[in-house]
Image: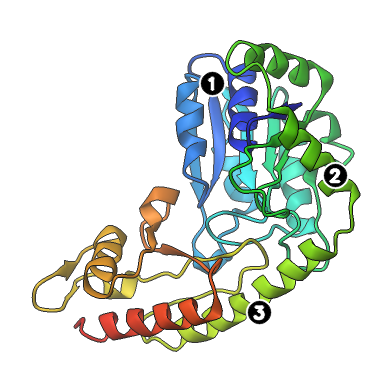
């Protein structure tokens, strides 16, 4: 089922699946639109959070504890935006086993960063036999094929869900534009060399930024295995000040960095993680090094 971007794909699925009051378990940190899409469909987002000490990945026990008789879906991304974390095959099997033990729960797996995965192999949760017929796999072209702005996403889903999404989309946008679909078909069938080269470049940038941010006292930095983001924990700076601005939370931290050294980063509160901020390394090495230098300069004034 082809849509105007992966976000519309997720919205179609939620509108098709949810009745008012139905719950969707969202593994957090999460992409900002997830909770709002669920609310738009009159569902209730249930956030299950994992911190940096868990590599931002929710455990089997946490997921099981969040499920109620109103749970209709589990929604997550891997590789993840905003953290870059990748659920391993074993971790995905844990999620699959939990869902398989409950009736009437659909997995919505956002895999748009499939081709920016630095681990050994991308694993789709829909490949597990016990949830194969209860999984909607979401993907698109803006990340792995650098087709940002072309607005083309798609789902692989059980026929009943795909058919319902088709009805919903027909009343909203009719369909995705034809020239993007032609380009996407070509991209999927063409040489993957450019995408693989892009992934190698992102990996080099990731290591560059990890090294730079890890050298800043007070930053807690993990080593994400995908996407093109870092998600440092900066809670150690809460309560500090440069004499003018006091840092009480991640929002304050991001505003301080922007106002003092003109580096734009995104507060973790937007993604369900109040102790963190998101930094994208989809920029040149020169820009990244300069950004790190400025951030280091700014936080050195906090005490």
Locate residue 118, reporting x and y percent: 73, 69
- Camera-side residue of 199 and 43: 199
Q: Considering only order in the chain, which callout, 3 or 1, is on the residue closer to the N terminus?
A: 1
**What residue sits 80% from the left and 36% below the top?**
182
- Tag 3 residue: 204
Side of 243 where 272 appears, left or right? right
Say which element carries label 1.
loop
Disc 2 to disc 3, C-alpha distance = 28 Å
Name the colouring of the figure: rainbow
Q: Residue at x 15, y 79 (%)?
A: 242
Q: Residue furthest left?
A: 244
Q: Left or right: 46 with respect to 275?
A: right
Q: Is residue 9 left or right of residue 156?
A: left
The mark lying in front, picked from 2 and 3, is 2
| Residue at image mark 1 | 22
Residue 250 locus on image (x, y percent): 31, 61
Q: Secondary structure at mark 3?
A: helix
- CB under 8 Å between discs 2 and 3: no
């Amino acid at each position: 089922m082809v849509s105007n971007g992966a976000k519309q794909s997720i919205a179609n699925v939620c509108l098709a699946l949810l009745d008012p009051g139905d719950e969707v378990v969202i593994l957090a940190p999460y992409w900002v639109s997830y909770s709002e899409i669920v609310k738009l469909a009159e569902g209730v987002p249930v956030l299950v959070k994992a911190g940096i000490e868990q590599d931002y990945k929710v455990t089997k026990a946490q997921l099981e504890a969040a499920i109620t008789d109103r749970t209709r879906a589990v929604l997550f991304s891997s590789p993840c935006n905003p953290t870059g974390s990748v659920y391993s095959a074993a971790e995905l099997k844990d999620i699959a086993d939990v869902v398989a033990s409950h009736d009437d729960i659909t997995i919505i797996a956002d895999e748009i960063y499939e081709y920016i995965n630095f681990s050994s192999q991308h694993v789709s949760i829909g490949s597990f036999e016990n949830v194969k017929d209860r999984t909607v796999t979401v993907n698109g072209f803006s990340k792995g094929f650098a087709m940002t702005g072309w607005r083309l996403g798609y789902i692989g889903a059980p026929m009943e869900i795909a058919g319902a999404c088709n009805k919903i989309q027909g009343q909203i946008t009719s369909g995705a534009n034809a020239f993007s679909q032609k380009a996407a078909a070509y991209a999927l069938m063409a040489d993957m060399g450019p995408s693989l080269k892009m992934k190698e470049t992102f990996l080099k940038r990731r290591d560059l930024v990890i090294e730079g941010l890890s050298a800043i006292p007070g930053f807690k930095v993990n080593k994400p295995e995908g996407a093109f983001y870092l998600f440092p924990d900066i809670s150690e700076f809460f309560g500090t000040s440069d004499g003018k601005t006091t840092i009480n939370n991640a929002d304050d931290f991001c505003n301080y960095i922007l106002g003092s050294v003109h580096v734009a980063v995104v507060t973790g509160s937007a993604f369900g993680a109040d102790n963190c901020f998101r930094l994208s390394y989809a920029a040149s090495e020169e820009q990244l090094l300069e950004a790190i230098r400025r951030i280091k300069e700014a936080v050195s004034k906090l005490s």
